[in-house]
Image (cartoon, rainbow, N blue to C red):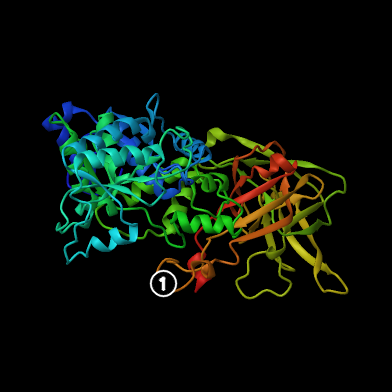
Amino acid sequence: MNTTGDTTREEGKKNLNFIETMVENDLKEGRNGKRVHTRFPPEPNGYLHIGHAKAICLDFGLAQRYGGKCNLRFDDTNPVKEDTEYVDSIMEDIHWLGFDWEDRLYYASDYFGQLWNFAVDLIKKGLAYVDDQPAEVISRQKGTPTQPGTESPYRTRSTAENLDLFERMNQGEFEEGSRVLRAKIDMTSPNMHMRDPIIYRIINHPHHRTGSAWKVYPMYDFAHGQCDYFEGITHSWCTLEFEVHRPLYDWFIDQLKDSDYRPRQTEFNRLNLTYTVMSKRKLLQLVKENYVNGWDDPRMPTLCGLRRRGYTPESIKSFIDKIGYTKFEAVNDVALLESAVRDDLNIRAPRVSTVLDPVKLIVTNYPEGQIELMEAVNNPEDESMGSHEIAFTQELFIEREDFMENPPKKYFRMTPGQEVRLKNAYIVKCTGCEKNETTGKIEKIYCEYDPQTRSGMPEANRKVKGTLHWVSTAHSLEAEVRLYDRLFCVENPNEDKDIDFRSLLNPDSLKILKNCRVEQELAKAKVSDKFQFQRLGYFSVDPDSEKEGRLIFNRIVPLKDSWSKTVK
């Protein structure tokens, strides 16, 4: 977790954040029988994004740390927007992050009967009534934060009439929007959420689990806290916008509870990222209007998109740990997330040679037809990963940008008369190049190698200023490489409400390179395998490779952050 706070955890003497401090104090005081029981309550109406990962790490992570339990409970109170596709994807994402709810899978719909009975009980106590007014009228009557609301003319309906109408609402006698059930609290409260909130509405749409059994459905504010109560949740964590809802949750629990137990709601800041939007509505627009290729497009902040791109769950959890949990809203630099990904992949990704924009390099004094197998270390950060062999031949491919015929000063790559080292092989000296007579484009580069500079030879350690990666023309494979970058070209695409966020999309967020060459070692690569392409960045095998029967790689992140220089 985050390192914000004053208290320290004994094992690592690491500062606790305010939520961890609260939990430890609750345990010391014996609150709720010294239990820690949390829940993650997603709505099954979309795909999870990295903001949800912050909540998942808190709910499941703290339950793990303090020997507690965490429930997965789907808040399926709006059948119009919900689908089993989202349920399945959410469960997959949670498992991918490394968490499990064991046998504690619940749905708000599991409690529809109990919630109905509670609503009926509120009517009987004179604390709820059926209102026939349209939603816009009810909204106007709520008043403003500085002006009290106006009571509904239906607020004084008799208990018998309210019970009858509520039952008939659920029988399907009335149209959607014609009636709602409201809690009777205080139309003069300074908290707008306490001004007779709507707790049930009519929805004539089949539910993905209960079918057509119900015609009325509880509002989120009515279901949320009570479901926590029914499940024995001790700590209910929400993002900061729900802070003003807490008095309403507490009011409902006060009417419901028959013991000293109650869930304790605490709010924390959302995860916001630069160059990103997190709004479900906006993400849905990007998908529906084909600005991206589905919810799992590697440019999306969805967990399935990040997974497809090649992000690791360890890197996401490390990033969340660094930004922490506070009471203050902030926008986090996406470069910090990318740095966490690099740090994680640096210690786990094998190094391989890949040429994205190949140009032929001919070693003129190397024996034609000869093949040498050079040893390439898989990962210098982890000797246990061993090494593999890469074929060296007379004809090679190097990156086109690694050669200049007339370079500027301090150019240390390949240029006529200059020596460079070919990684894991020899030092070579460029002797010239061959151009296309029509276009002037360089088609071949020529060089000579020094046979005394291979590893183990007398001059193997001779100093040269440039080292290039390469692959053999005859012993390499063709591949497609997709270079993904940030989806938006401005830091905060949400900042100006008068500008259509879609106009701020980065036109270079995806570049597809078709004729790349990769070393033969990658013939064994499987979907989601991750590699460091020498000098180029970290890449992952895309699922399309399996479908199309060819190698397709996604760039996860470059080796270093060059974006700030690019956009200026």
Closer to the camera in the image, 562 or 421:
562
Drawn side of residue 536 relative to residue 546, left or right: left
Image height of 415 relative to 103, above or below: below
Residue 441, image x, y percentages: 80, 70
Residue 189, image x, y percentages: 15, 56
Drawn side of residue 148 relative to residue 557, left or right: left
Residue 8, image x, y percentages: 19, 41
Q: Amino acid at mark 1?
A: Asp
Residue 536, picture quadrant? bottom right
Drawn side of residue 144 relative to residue 553, left or right: left
Image height of 425 relative to 463, above or below: above
Locate the N terminus by quadrant.
top left
Drawn side of residue 559 relative to residue 435, left or right: left
Residue furthest top as drawn: 103
The residue located at (17%, 29%) in the rendering is: 32
The residue located at (65%, 54%) in the rendering is: 482
**Label 1 crowd (10 A; few <14 / some 14-19 / many >=20):** few
**Residue 377 seen anywhere in this rendered image of the structure:** yes
Closer to the camera in the image, 521 or 330:
330
Residue 531, image x, y percentages: 60, 44
Q: Which residue is mark 1?
A: 496
Closer to the camera in the image, 194 or 365:
194
The residue located at (76%, 46%) in the rendering is: 477
Residue 257, picture quadrant? top left
**Residue 233 seen anywhere in this rendered image of the structure:** no
Closer to the camera in the image, 261 or 166:
166
Image height of 440 relative to 543, above or below: below
Element marked by disc 1: loop
